[in-house]
Amino acid sequence: MNMHEPVTQLEIDQRVFDLYDEYCHGRIDRREFLARASALVVGGLAMAQALLPRYALAQTISFTDARMKAQYVTYPSPGGNSGQMRGYLVQPAGSGPFPAVLVIHENRGLNPYIEDVARRAAVEGFLALAPDGLFPVGGYPGNDDDGRTLQGNLDQGKLRTDMLNSARFLKSHKLATGKLGVTGFCWGGGTTNYLAVALGAEMHAGVPFYGAAAETASVPKIKAPLLIHYAENDAGINGMRPAFEAALKANGVPHEMHMYPGTLHGFHNNSTPRYNEAAAKLAWERTVAFFKKNLG
């Protein structure tokens, strides 16, 4: 392996990807991840280091893109972790009003990749808000390791309340039409499903990316159509699919599910080698079309 060239997905041993998944979900720390990868396979340390996010790669829409305007906003969040929340609000060019899309981060706070996804939504014509669940503890700290620790230590019920309040803030924003879509990734995918339950008819479309299913008993509360994206190699999330699918069908919830062959959990995130360009682009095209259809 030439150390001067970026390591590609094909060159990384599946066992190192499996370790990265444990690391991503907070079950091992960075030191243990690197040490175990080194011991596992020749070149394992290089493979492990290649998997750590490179956020310069994540930017596809410049901060100064003329098609949108971005700003940080604060708003009240009663019952949340501090009573206040902050988010990254991106509005399309023009005077609006615009259909709204909430963009929910992974299990490590509002990192540059998620901010870029909010900008991607805005250039498609949506008023996008990406809340930072870590705001009550100082905000996304600039790196995923500390972000993951901070998010894991929060009161998880209050964190969900902060996301619920973020959705309602966005839906009632003066630039919004009142039509609300929600998307999210990893933890944010599970939270998208949670918000579909909690918001009921207040939510008009949901697009979870590889997120934990809603509790089966709560599925009757879901009124929004769902577009559900799965990675093929993602046993923990995919194991929840059959019960979720059965409950959605039994309750007449409009839904479509897509499995992306050859992908890993996190395939949409273009800052690590888990990124699968073809699958990510297809999933995003489907997401935009779904929101345009359901949010008007």
Image: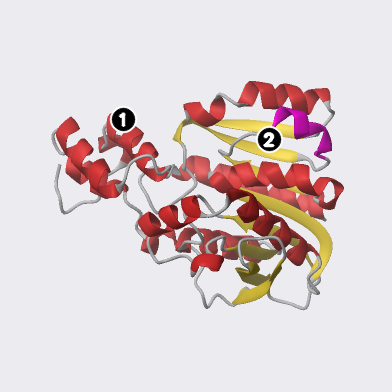
User: Mark 1 Cα within 10 Å, few/some/many (few <14, many 20+)?
Assistant: few
One can see residue 65 in this view:
yes
Image coordinates of residue 265 in percent, x first then y, are 47, 38
In the picture, residue 98 is in which quadrant? bottom right
At label 2, the amino acid type is: Ala
Q: What's the magenta bit mostly, secondary-structure-wise?
A: helix
Q: Is residue 216 magenta?
A: yes
The residue positioned 28% from the left and 48% from the top of the image is 30
One can see residue 260 in this view:
no
Which quadrant holds the N terminus?
Answer: top left
| Left or right: 56, with 77 as reference point | left
Please name the residue that numbered disc 1 is placed on.
14
- Please say which color scheme the image uses: secondary structure
The residue positioned 47% from the left and 61% from the top of the image is 111
Mark 1 vs mark 2: in front: 2
The residue positioned 47% from the left and 54% from the top of the image is 108
In the picture, residue 95 is in which quadrant? bottom right
Between 26 and 40, the one lying in front of the other is 26
| Left or right: 12, with 73 as reference point | left
At label 1, the amino acid type is: Gln
The residue positioned 37% from the left and 61% from the top of the image is 143
Image coordinates of residue 211 in percent, x first then y, are 58, 39
| Left or right: 24, with 67 as reference point | left
Please name the residue that numbered disc 2 is placed on.
214
Q: Is residue 52 magenta?
A: no
Q: For the residue labelled by badge 1, is the local secondary structure a helix, a strand or a loop? A: helix
User: Mark 2 Cα within 10 Å, few/some/many (few <14, many 20+)?
Assistant: many
In the picture, residue 228 is in which quadrant? top right
